[in-house]
């Protein structure tokens, strides 16, 4: 059997955050049942192509968005049941759902756990109420603490907490306090992303954000603090307690096959790449319609190998790279970064250091 991951896109949100650049909708909640019907239909049809009879078994399932926890948990259960009915799901399959604090409650957790969900990702971003309001997050700190308490009361052991560095009103002092606060709740996984500058909406609050030097100080302190808390920095923006790395995301970085289900979802299977259409009404009518289908040639595979592997603490295996590119040229291009301490070579691997993660785009462009 060939391993396959499933990504399920739930595009609905209570509000659209000002920094967000994902395919989401805040004005279509009445369409949720109809969307789920189309999604379930797509699950069944895709299973005919990538189910057990075609030689595939499901290694991980990930509900992302949008805000998957916004919709009725029984609809999440319905999707999982359809997946288990139509695909071959491995025993011990990691099933993750992204949650927002305002939509976490005991009822949801009970249904999620009974449905087989094994991992939870909580989108906190910040504990500061003014910062949350400024970026149009639909929750406040009270809702965050209530959600964390629900996790504890529901016996959730495997959960991650997501934050953003560089938000408006954030200081080095306030950032440190937020990190210390979440560590008291003993998450098994944490994600800290730098604020992305690729959306025009950021102009609404960019002047209120900490400068680049302050953000670097946040990152450097964070690396040291999480290391003391026994977290492994296993990917540029992700830290995990031993054994709690995201299996699903690691499969992306290792260029393993995955099938995206839902509006706008992407897929890579057997050397082919495609995405589902992003028109909402068109998806409801035909959930199987795809766009931008293309074959992944050797050079694209090589470039993705560099971009994705350098994001991880394992880095690039040079023996594997030799099958797709010139190792001597790669090492020559990497030499200035090795000398500066941003990249290191350990045996047959080439890895970015924690300081290298800060300039990863520069390193990657040079190696490409």
Image (spheres, rainbow, N blue to C red):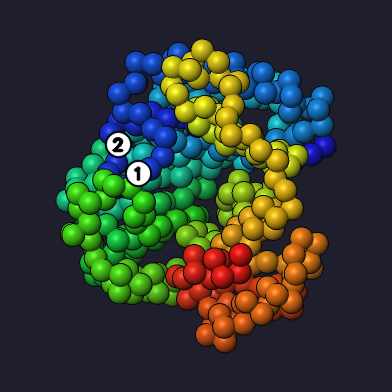
Most extreme residue toward the bottom, as rendered?
339
In this view, the residue in front, 363 or 260, is 363
State the image coordinates of residue 126 (x, y, percent, origin top left). Answer: 29, 53
Q: Is 292 placed left or right of 329 in the picture?
A: left
Nearer the observer, 11 or 200: 200
Q: Label 1: how many residues lie within 10 Å, few (<14), some (14-19) or many (20+)? A: some
Up the image or down, 213 lies above or below 103; here it is: below
* Residue occupying image coordinates x 38% and y 60%: 194
Q: Nearer the viewer, residue 190 or 171?
A: 171
Number of the label disc, if any, that sits on residue 20: 1
Position of residue 7 relative to residue 310, above or below, is: above
Q: Is residue 293 left or right of residue 363?
A: right
Residue tagged 2? 16
Query: Is residue 206 shown to the viewer in this render?
Result: yes
User: Which quadrant would residue 117 be assigned to in this image?
Assistant: top right
Q: How many numbered circles does the render carry? A: 2
Question: Residue 346: which numbered mark, if any?
Answer: none
Taking the image as drawn, is residue 357 in sight? Answer: no
Q: Secondary structure at mark 1?
A: loop
Is 53 above or below relative to 295? above
Q: Residue at x 57, y 30 (%)?
A: 291
The quadrant of the picture occupied by the C terminus is bottom right
Residue 226 position by quadrant: bottom left
SS at badge 2: loop
Q: Quadrant of residue 143?
A: top left
| Residue 209 horizontal/vertical position (percent) | 23, 61
**Residue sitting nearer the eye, 365 or 225:** 365
Is disc 1 in contact with disc 2, using a CB cutoff of under 8 Å? yes
Q: Give the image location of residue 300, x and y in percent.
A: 67, 52
- Distance from disc 1 to disc 2, alpha carbons, whole Å, reads 7 Å
């Amino acid at each position: 059997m060939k391993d396959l991951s499933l990504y399920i896109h739930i595009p609905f949100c209570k509000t659209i955050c000002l920094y967000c650049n994902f395919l989401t909708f805040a004005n279509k909640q009445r369409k949720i049942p109809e969307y789920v019907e189309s999604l379930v239909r797509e699950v069944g049809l895709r299973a005919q192509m990538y189910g057990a009879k075609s030689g595939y078994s499901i290694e991980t399932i990930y509900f992302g968005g949008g805000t998957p926890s916004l919709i009725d948990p029984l609809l999440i259960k319905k999707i999982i049941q359809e997946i288990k009915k139509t695909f071959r799901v491995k025993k011990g399959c990691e099933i993750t759902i992204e949650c927002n604090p305002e939509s976490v409650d005991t009822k949801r957790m009970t249904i999620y756990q009974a449905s087989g969900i094994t991992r939870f990702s909580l989108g906190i971003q910040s504990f500061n109420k003014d910062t949350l309001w400024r970026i149009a997050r639909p929750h406040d700190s009270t809702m965050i603490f209530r959600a964390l308490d629900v996790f504890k009361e529901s016996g959730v052991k495997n959960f991650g907490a997501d934050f953003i560095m560089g938000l408006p009103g954030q200081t080095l002092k306030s950032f440190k306090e937020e990190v210390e606060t979440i560590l008291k709740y003993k998450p098994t996984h944490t994600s800290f992303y730098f604020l992305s500058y690729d959306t025009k909406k950021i102009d609404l609050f960019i002047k209120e954000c900490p400068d680049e030097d302050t953000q670097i100080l946040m990152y450097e302190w964070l690396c040291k603090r999480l290391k003391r808390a026994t977290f492994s920095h296993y990917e540029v923006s992700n830290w995990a307690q031993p054994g709690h790395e995201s299996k699903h995301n690691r499969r992306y970085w290792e260029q393993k096959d995955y099938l995206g289900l839902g509006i706008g979802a992407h897929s890579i299977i057997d050397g082919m790449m495609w995405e589902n259409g992003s028109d909402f009404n068109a998806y409801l009518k035909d959930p199987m319609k795809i766009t931008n289908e293309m074959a992944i040639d050797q050079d694209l595979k090589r470039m993705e190998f560099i971009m994705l592997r350098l994001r991880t603490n394992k880095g690039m295996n040079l023996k594997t790279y030799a099958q797709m590119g010139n190792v001597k040229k790669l090492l020559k291009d990497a030499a200035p970064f090795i000398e500066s301490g941003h990249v290191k070579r350990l045996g047959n691997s080439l890895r970015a250091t924690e300081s290298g993660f800060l300039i990863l785009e520069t390193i990657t462009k040079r190696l490409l």
